[in-house]
Amino acid sequence: MTQSLPAGDLPALTAALIDIGSVSFYEGPITDALEAELAGLAHLETHRVGDNLVARTNLGRARRIVLAGHTDTVPAAGNDRARIDGDTVWGLGAADMKSGVAVLLELARTVTAPTVDVSYVLYAREEVDSRHSGLKELFEARPDLLEADVALLAEPTGGAVEAGCQGTLRARVTLAGERAHTARAWMGRNAIHRLAGVLDALADYEPRRPDVDGCQYREGLQAVAVAGGAAGNVVPDEASVTVNHRFAPDRTPAEAEAHVRAVLAPVLDAGDTVELLDAAPAARPGLNDPLLAALAERNRLTVRAKLGWTDVAFFAARGVPASNFGPGDPLLAHTRDEHVGREAIESTYAALGDLLVNGA
C-alpha cells in the first residue's frame, strides 16, 4: 500500500518525495505515490501513460495552462535520503526537481476551482537522452492531454522566470589525412595535426548575444570530444572533433547548422566532412502571453533568458508559449550538496497559486 504524502508543509513534502527514489527509468514508485494522491480528487481527472501522470481540471474555462515537472533524478552521490535542517531540505533532487514537483502536487490538491483550467503533467526520464523523454512519450501517445494555451515547467530557476530556451546541436567534424610510417612522416599528412586549425577557429569564436522578445541570449560553440589515431607508428589519416552549438531562439536548427558550417568552412579541405549528429529546437520566450506576463509582473519576478535547453521546446514546437519557473537553484542541480530552502518553495507555490486563482 502506498503511504500518503504530507500535506500543507512543502519542505516535508519535498523531503518525502526525495525519499522515494526515482533515478531515470525507475520512476514507477514515485508515479504510484503521486497517482494515489491525485486519482481520488473530485476536481481532477487523472490519466496514467506508463510512468507519466496527467491530472486535469475540466471546468470549461476560456484558457488552459500546463504546469509540468519531471519526476526523475540523476544517480545518487550519497545523498539519496532527505535531511531537513531548519528551513533547508537536503537530498538528491531537492533542487532538480523534487521541490518543483512538491509545489505542483500541493497546487493540484488545494486549488480546486482555478480561474483557468490546469493540466498537471508529471513525467519520467527527463535527465537522460531526449529520445527517452516521458514528455515526448505523452506527445506521441496522448497529445490531447497536453493541449494548452501556455505552459510552465518547474525547472530549477531560483524563483526567476527563465524564458524559452536555447536550441542545441552536435556535429562531428572529420578531417582527412594520408597514412605513412612515422619514420617517413613527410610522405603522409597528419590528420590529428590538422585539428589545430579547427580548434583555433572554435577558440576564437565570438558568440552572438541576440535580444529575442526582450531577453538576451548568449550562444556558444565548443569542442566536446576528439578522436583519431591508428597506431603508434602510423601518421593518422583521419581525426575528428565533435562540437556542440547552443543557439538562440531566433534561429531554426537548420539555420544554426548552416552557421556552424560557415564558421568551420575556412579550415576545411576537400575530403573533410561535417556530420550533424543531433539537434533540438529552441523556444521563444513567449512573454507576451497574458498569463506568463501576469506571473512575472504581479510577483515582481526576475525575467531572463534560459541559456540551456529544456522541455519547453516540446511545447513551443507545437505553438504553445512556454517558460521555466521553479524553486530550485540551477547551480545546485546534480551536485552532492543539492538543497532548497523553505522560502524558495513557498514563494513559488504562492506565485503559481495566485496565477491559478486570479488568472491574467
Image (cartoon, rainbow, N blue to C red):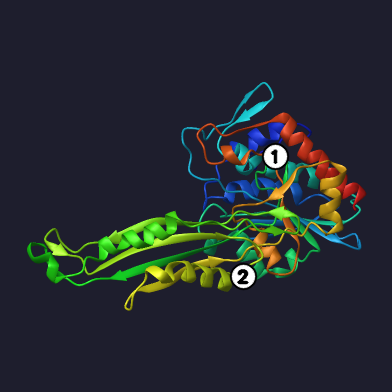
| Of callouts 2 and 1, the N-terminal one | 2
Residue annotated with mark 1: 327
* Nearer to us in this view, 98 or 252: 252
Relative horizontal placement of residue 112, taking residue 74 as reference (left or right): right
Furthest residue in direction top, as rendered: 86
* Nearer to us in this view, 275 or 319: 275
Question: Looking at the picture, which amino acid does disc 1 mark?
Answer: Pro
| Quadrant of the rendering where the N terminus is positioned | top right
Q: Quadrant of residue 331?
A: top right
- The local crowd at label 1, few if under 14, some if 14 to 19, many if 20 or more residues have their Cα within 10 Å, is many
Q: Position of residue 175 (x, y in %)?
A: 31, 69
Whether residue 42 is visible, yes or no, is no
Q: Position of residue 39 (x, y in %)?
A: 75, 52
Tell me the mark number nearer the camera, choosing from 2 and 1: 2
Q: Position of residue 226 (x, y in %)?
A: 33, 58
Q: Residue at x 84, y 44 (%)?
A: 353
Residue annotated with mark 2: 252
Q: Position of residue 59 (x, y in %)?
A: 90, 59
Question: Looking at the picture, which amino acid does disc 2 mark?
Answer: Thr
Q: Measured along the vertical axis of the image, is residue 122 above or below residue 278?
A: above
Please, what secondary structure does the residue beneath circle 2 have? loop
